[in-house]
Image (tube, helix red, strand yellow):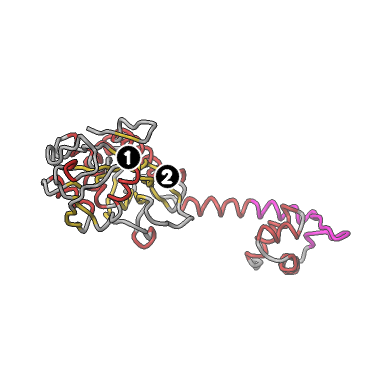
Amino acid sequence: MKLPPLNTLRVFDAAARHEAFGKAAQELHVTHGAVSRQIKLLEQALGLTLFERRNRAVFLTDSGRQLLGVTRSLFEQLAAGLTALRQPAADAPLVLSCEPTIAMMWLIPRLPEFQRRHPGMQVHLYAAGGPVDFAAQGVDVALRRNDFEWDAALHAGKVCEEWTGPVCRPGLAAVRDHGAGADAWGGAAALGSATRPQAWRQWSQASGRRAPRRPGPAYEHFYLSLQAAAAGLGVAIGSALMVRDALRDHRLEAPCGFVRDGSAYFLLSPRPFGDDPRAAAFLAWLRQEAAASLPGANDDGQSVAS
């Protein structure tokens, strides 16, 4: 027997579940007339009456009820099969796109701990920032700060808020009196970054303190400005997350502590995290590590890391 067109079965399934052509039309985003035409085509193809039409209402016939059982099973199996096809293999590497600075200064040193906890799971790191084309780049998840707009269809799991503050080589800027004059910074220059051009202004607004008066060079990347600060070339705005290890190792100091700058880090995924156990595990671990890297946060929005 030649099978009827799949679309007629799809329309029938909706109409039969609702026993109403109008509700089926709403579900399928088509007109009432389109539903009625598809049902007539199916009845003609099968040589059966599937609905009894009385007083502008429709009721399933015995044949219609039997066919509904078939279509329910058909579409449920189809949905389950497609979901299984979209599920990545449990042992497939998790491909992560991550902003370069946070990857180099925070994430990579912590990845061995993640792999110790999840020995059967590999993370392949792809360094990039901004929008990501998951399909074209073969990426499963992306770690991003919300300083740009991403597709509303993406699933976003918040990792942590961003905290920023001035950082420099220990002893370079003996900031104890946060006054208005340049002497409050010991004459140190304010280093900038092309990737975060408003960092000093945002920190000043959030903290109520003034930046160094002497401008320094603006480096192409955020990472380079932090490296320059560690080398003693001036004071840069640092992310508390990214400079955590440098503060611990006394390669940098944060004389003013850190404040929230209003942004946050998110793990982005094209599919729900519950559909990919690898991504769900990685998100949970990221949140735990971020919380451990941002100690001392007070309710007033101030944090001092050492």
Residue 120 is covered by the magenta coloring: no
Label located before the other in sequence (1 or 2): 2
**Residue 14 position by quadrant:** bottom right
- Residue furthest right in the image: 55
Q: Toward the viewer: 292 or 51?
A: 292
Q: Where is residue 185 shown, x and y percent of the image?
A: 17, 42
Residue 58 is left or right of residue 215, and the answer is right
Residue 59 is covered by the magenta coloring: yes
Residue 169 is left or right of residue 257, and the answer is left
> Which disc number belongs to residue 259?
1
Residue 120 visible in the picture: yes
Tell me the magenta residue range: 49-72
> Which residue is denoted by mark 2 in the rendering?
157
Residue 90 is left or right of residue 196, and the answer is right
Q: Toward the viewer: 206 or 8?
A: 206
Q: Where is residue 150 shown, x and y percent of the image?
A: 42, 56
Q: Where is residue 88 shown, x and y percent of the image?
A: 40, 50
Residue at (69% x, 51% y) in the render: 69
Q: Toward the viewer: 275 or 156?
A: 156
Q: What is the quadrant of the N terminus in the image?
A: bottom right
* Circle nearer the viewer, 1 or 2: 1
Q: At label 1, which amino acid type do we have?
A: Val
Q: At label 2, which amino acid type do we have?
A: Gly
Q: Where is residue 228 shown, x and y percent of the image?
A: 14, 50
Residue at (75% x, 52% y) in the render: 65
Residue at (32% x, 37% y) in the render: 290
Residue 112 visible in the picture: no
* SS at badge 1: strand
